DNA sequence: TGCAACGTCGTGAAATTTTCCCGGCGCTCG
DNA sequence: CGAGCGCCGGGAAAATTTCACGACGTTGCA
């Protein structure tokens, strides 16, 4: 902490939303916003420059997303304190964020007090998870849903990614330099492992587990 | 307009984001925030109470979403001025919002000035569309992508909705009281009409056109 | 070292689904 | 009334999905 309180950096691609963070945080004595970034690359660059005590980071951003930004920043500074603040009320994203090195995960539906408390918790060295995500995590455990990143091999995961991104089995076979038949086999195997019947269910599961985001799909 | 300037109502399920709107708008003389709602139902109720000159509305909200809220409010007051302010940089959503009765559509990635200008435009009776959405609309025209709501008959659209929501062909056949064969036929016909090969592409298209949202899919 | 387990890639054949073509039915419109 | 269209499904060919199986390389462990 510097002379004037904890230094906070905000990362969110929506300027108006950053304005909201700022407004909430400045009511809290001992906090000051020293930098703002609107995407992952800028966040990484500005972190190295301004070395804030804490980063409040959104996940869905154009270009380098939040998860990748977390990984890069943590690689640069193992002690970096990052609090994820996102709309995704989704256990899969939370798990990914914590694994990437975040110290906290709070959803945007939370009241401002929850955000402030989480900021204080993370600054104090504690891990902060908002109650709704705790609940989601518990649910996904209870449902016994297989986590794609766990049950799938690297190759299978790669094929899954391509299935969701590319168009036809043939195209995927070509990018992977294997026979279309193999891709089809993997496709079937993946659905079996994840316990889904149709491709539509597959997409739903992928979305739920944060393997892809709406914007990934939305792009042409 | 009342004695103290235009009365604005904010609708967004994220409290911190509303704080951002408020912070941006209060810098603008002649505007004051008179009400806030966090979902569609509350928005409808509060609109009837406080009769604001303008509503700034998010689309993705729990329960009654933004589109439905727009329809209800416009049904209650044909002259209601509603400006959609959302993260969805998506021509499909914009078209739906305008058809539902919105007077403007601005994405959250826009700078605060764009929001303020749009607010002023709508208050002055003009329609405000942010430049990125103009661009999206132009692109979707150029790509010649068929709009699901246009080329599909009511029945086909219903089946599409169920395909994306339910699990198996059999279950859909049951809910519709037709033979599974018919559903399969429709399924095939729909893909043909929309010009997609696989179910995964179908989901992507539906997402892009705003037929379903990420949260729809995310629910178990 | 040897060998068991596993991931990867592929073949083949059966089972299933998708797709296309068809006819019947009811409705609307000129 | 006849043409056109949406809706419902049968039938059959075509394509895909699924399953069983084998080969090969790697890893890990006794």
Image (spheres, coloured by chain):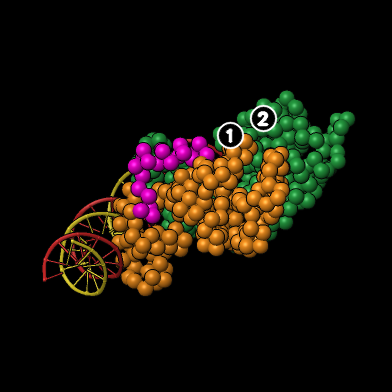
Chain colours: A green, B orange, C yellow, D red
Q: Residue at x 65, y 40 (%)?
A: A16
Nearer to us in this view, A149 or A65: A65
Determine if the magenta segment contains residue B138: yes
Q: Is residue B156 left or right of residue B9?
A: left
Q: What stretch is highlighted in magenta?
A: B130-150
Q: Distance between the residues labelled 2 and 1?
A: 10 Å
State the count of labels: 2
Q: In this view, does A191 lie above or below B24?
A: below
Q: Name the disc covering residue A44, or none.
A: 2
Residue A37 screen position, x and y as percent: 66, 32
| Residue at which label 1 appears | A64
Q: In this view, does A73 lie to the left or right of B61?
A: right
Residue A21 screen position, x and y as percent: 72, 42
Q: Is mark 2 in CB contact (under 8 Å) with mark 1?
A: yes
Subunit ID for the residue under disc 2:
A
Quadrant of the image occupied by residue A101: top right
Local SS, label 2: helix
Q: Which residue is drawn at 82% across and 38% down?
A: A31
Nearer to us in this view, A34 or A15: A15
Looking at the image, the residue that sits furthest to the top is: A49
| Of callouts 2 and 1, the N-terminal one | 2
Local SS, label 1: loop
Q: Residue at x 60, y 43 (%)?
A: B119
Determine if the magenta segment contains residue B87: no
């Amino acid at each position: 902490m510097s002379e004037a309180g904890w230094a906070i950096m905000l990362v969110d691609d929506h300027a108006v939303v950053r304005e909201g963070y700022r407004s909430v945080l400045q009511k809290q004595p001992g906090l000051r916003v020293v930098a703002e970034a609107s995407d992952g690359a800028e966040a990484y660059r500005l972190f190295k420059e301004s070395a804030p005590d804490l980063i409040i980071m959104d996940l869905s951003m154009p270009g380098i997303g939040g998860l990748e930004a977390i990984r890069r920043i943590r690689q640069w500074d193992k002690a970096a304190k990052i609090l994820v603040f996102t709309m995704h009320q989704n256990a899969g994203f939370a798990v990914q964020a914590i694994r990437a090195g975040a110290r906290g995960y709070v959803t945007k539906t939370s009241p401002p007090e929850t955000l402030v408390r989480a900021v204080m918790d993370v600054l104090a060295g504690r891990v902060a998870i908002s109650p709704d995500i705790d609940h989601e995590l518990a649910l996904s455990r209870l449902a016994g849903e297989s986590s794609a990143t766990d049950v799938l091999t690297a190759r299978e995961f790669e094929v899954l990614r391509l299935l969701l991104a590319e168009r036809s089995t043939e195209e995927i076979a070509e990018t992977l330099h294997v026979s279309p038949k193999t891709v089809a086999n993997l496709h079937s195997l993946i659905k079996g492992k994840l316990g889904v019947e149709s491709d539509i269910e597959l997409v739903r599961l992928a979305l739920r587990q944060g393997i892809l985001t709406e914007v990934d799909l939305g792009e042409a």
